[in-house]
Amino acid sequence: MKYLIANWKMNHTVAQGIEYLKEYQSLQPKISKTKVLIAPSYTSFFPLSQIIQKETIPVSLCAQNICEFKRGAYTGEVSAEMIQEIGCKYVLLGHSERRHLFHESNESINKKYQMALDYSLIPIICFGETLPVYQTKKTVSYITEQLLFLKGEKPPIFAYEPVWSIGSGLIPRIDEIETIVDFMKQNFPASSLLYGGSVNPETIQSIAKIEGLDGFLVGGASLQAVTFIKLLSSFENPGNDR
Ligand code: 13P
C-alpha cells in the first residue's frame, strides 16, 4: 500500500479545514494507488469526518498523537478510545516534534504503541536522527536504538523523518535515504516505510523514485490543497516531472 499523509500539525481551524477539503474535492485529484490521510487537530476531527462522509471524499483522518494512558486524570490528553470512537483509524506516534518539544521518550512511545493496538488504531511510527548524529554519520546506530522497543513487533507503517530536514528545506541525499530503506526492509520486512522532511513539489520528484519507499509524510507543503494534490500527482506518476 502507498500512502501520502498531510500532517497539518497545529494549523488550520475547523473553518479552514472545511475549506481545504472542499477545494481538495473540487480539484478532483486522480488517485489510483495511494491512500491519502489527513492529520488535523483534534478539534477538527468531528466536522471533517462528517464532510468526508457526506461528500464521499477519498481521504481518511489520522490523529497526530494519543495519550499513553487509557483514561483518567490526565488533563489535556486525548485517549486512544476517544480517537477510535470518532471513527479515526490511524495515529502518528513519536513524531520528532513530540519527542523534542514535549520530551516523549521511547518508553512512552512504546506505551502509546500498545494503546493504539489495544484500540485497533493503525500506528504510524516516526523516527529519525538529529543533525549532530547525521553529521557524525551515526544515523543507523541512532535509529536502531530508537526502534529497539519494537523488536519482535510488526508495526504496519513507519515514517523516516530526519529531524534536521523537517521544515528546513534540506533533504538527505538519495543514497542516504536508500540506506534507511534497506535497513528497514531488513529489520521490518512486512512494514511500509514513508519519508518525511521538506517534501515539496520539487523535492518529491527524485525521492518518489526510490525503490521500496511507500510514501510520504508531509508538513508545510500539505497545508494548501492545491500543493498537496501536486505531491499526489508526482507520487502517482514519478516519471512525470511536471
Ligand atoms: P515538513 O514537510 O514541513 O518538513 O514537515 C515534515 C513533518 O514533520 C511531517 O510530519
Image (cartoon, rainbow, N blue to C red):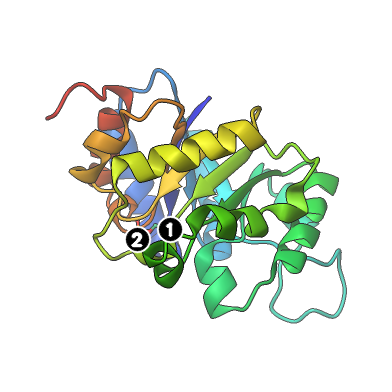
Residue nearest the observer in this picture, 123 or 136: 136
Q: What kind of residue is marked 2?
A: Ser
Q: Is residue 97 above or below residue 232?
A: below
**Splitting the image into 4 quarters, where does residue 185 fall?**
top right
Residue nearest the observer in this picture, 142 or 232: 142
Q: Which mark is residue 84?
A: none
Residue lying at the far left in this picture: please name it: 242
* Residue 66 in sight here: yes
Label 2 – label 1 distance at C-alpha: 5 Å
Residue nearest the observer in this picture, 97 or 37: 97
At mark 1, the secondary structure is loop
Task: Work out which quarter of the rendered image holds the C terminus and state it.
Answer: top left
Q: Say which residue appears at 81% left-offset and 54% top-offset.
A: 115
Q: Is residue 14 above or below residue 53?
A: below
Q: Say which residue appears at 32% left-offset and 64% top-offset.
A: 167
Q: In this view, does 16 lie to the left or right of 203?
A: right
Q: Where is residue 60 in the image (x, y as percent from the top left)?
A: 54, 38
Q: Residue 165 carries which label?
A: 2
Q: Say which residue appears at 36% left-offset and 55% top-offset.
A: 197
Residue lying at the far top in this picture: please name it: 32
Q: Position of residue 218 (x, y in %)?
A: 38, 50
Residue nearest the observer in this picture, 51 or 122: 122
At mark 2, the secondary structure is helix
**Splitting the image into 4 quarters, where does residue 120 fall?**
top right
Ligand 1 closer than 8 Å to label 2 CB: yes
Q: In this view, does 31 lie above or below 6?
A: above
The crowding category of the residue bearing disc 2, from other C-alpha atoms within 10 Å (few below 14, some 14 to 19, many at least 20), is some
Q: Say which residue appears at 46% left-offset and 67% top-offset.
A: 133
Q: What kind of residue is marked 1?
A: Pro
* Residue 63 in sight here: no
Q: In which quarter of the image is ligand 1?
A: bottom left
Which residue matches tag 1?
Answer: 162
